[in-house]
Amino acid sequence: MPTESDFQLARESASLAGKLLMLLRKSASDSDVPSSTLGEIADKESHELLCGLILDVSPDDAILSEEQEDDLKRLDSNRVWIIDPLDGTKEFGETDRSDWAVHVALVEGGIPTVGAVAMPDIGTTFCSNDPSLPLKEITEIRITSSRTRPVPAAQIIADELSGEIILMGSAGAKAMAVVKGDAEIYVHTGGQYEWDSCAPVAVALANGLHASKLDGSPLLYNQRNTYLPELLICRKELADSVLAIFN
C-alpha cells in the first residue's frame, strides 16, 4: 500500500519537472533552438531530474521510463515508478499550447496506486490523493482524441452517442479534461505504452471515473510487454454505453 510520502513524492517530482520544462521552454523561445531539439533536451533533462528525485527518496524501487532502456529487473520489484518525463513533446514545442504534461505513477502488483499528472503551462498538478473534483451533470458528450493520430474509435463513439470530438495533445491532458469536467470520454487505440496512461489512469480512478481497455478488461502495468494501445477513460454513467459499442 502506498504511503503519504509516496503521494508527496509523485506530486512534488512531477511539479518540479514541470517547472524545469517551463524554464527550458522559455529559454528556447529567446533563442533559435528548433522545437525538435528542444523536445530532445527537455525529455532528457526531465527524465534525469525525476529519476534523481525518486531514487533519492526510494532507492530500492524500480523505474520504467519512456526515456531509458527497459530493465526487466523491474518485473521482480513490488514497487515500480512509471514515468513519462514529457508527454506531448510536439505540443511542448509549440509555445501557444498547454496540452502537454509530466506523468509520475507508482505501480504495486500491476495496479497504479499513486499517480500525479503535472500540467505546467496551466500551473496545476493533479494527484490521486487530492479530494475528488465534483462531477457535473452530463448535458453533452464530448470526446477527447489525439490531434496528431486520428482515432476511428472516437468518431464511432461520437456517431453513436451524438457526441463532439475535441482534439488535444498529451494523453495526460486528455485524461485530465475528463477529470476536470471539460469532457466526458477519452478514448485511444494504438501507439501508446504504459508510461502514456499509467499516471492519468491513477488520477482518473481516484476521481471516480471508469478506466479500462475497450473490451472492458482492466489496465495492468509493469508488464513484460509495455505496449498498451487501448484506453478508455470516461464518466461511469457512460461506461456501459461506450463498451457496448465495441463488444
Image (cartoon, rainbow, N blue to C red):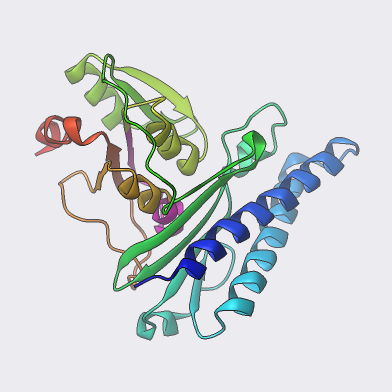
Residue 22's quadrant in the figure? top right
Q: Residue furthest right?
A: 31
Left or right side of 218 for 178: right
Q: Is residue 138 magenta?
A: no
Question: Residue 234, position in %: x, y?
Answer: 28, 35
User: Can you say whether 35 is above or below 202 in the image?
Assistant: above
Left or right side of 193 for 135: left
Left or right side of 208 for 62: right
32, 244: nearer the viewer: 244
Residue drawn at the location 27% of the way across and 14% of the way down = 139
228, 134: nearer the viewer: 134
Residue 140's quadrant in the figure? top left
Question: Residue 96, position in %: x, y?
Answer: 69, 26
- What count of labels does the image hold? 0
Question: Residue 117, position in %: x, y?
Answer: 51, 49
Residue drawn at the location 19% of the way across and 18% of the way down = 161
**Quadrant of image for the C terminus:** top left
Residue drawn at the location 71% of the way across and 53% of the way down = 42
18, 34: nearer the viewer: 18
Question: Residue 134, position in %: x, y?
Answer: 35, 32
**Quadrant of image for the N terminus:** bottom left
User: Can you say whether 23 is above or below 11 in the image?
Assistant: above
- Which segment is the magenta one? 186-199
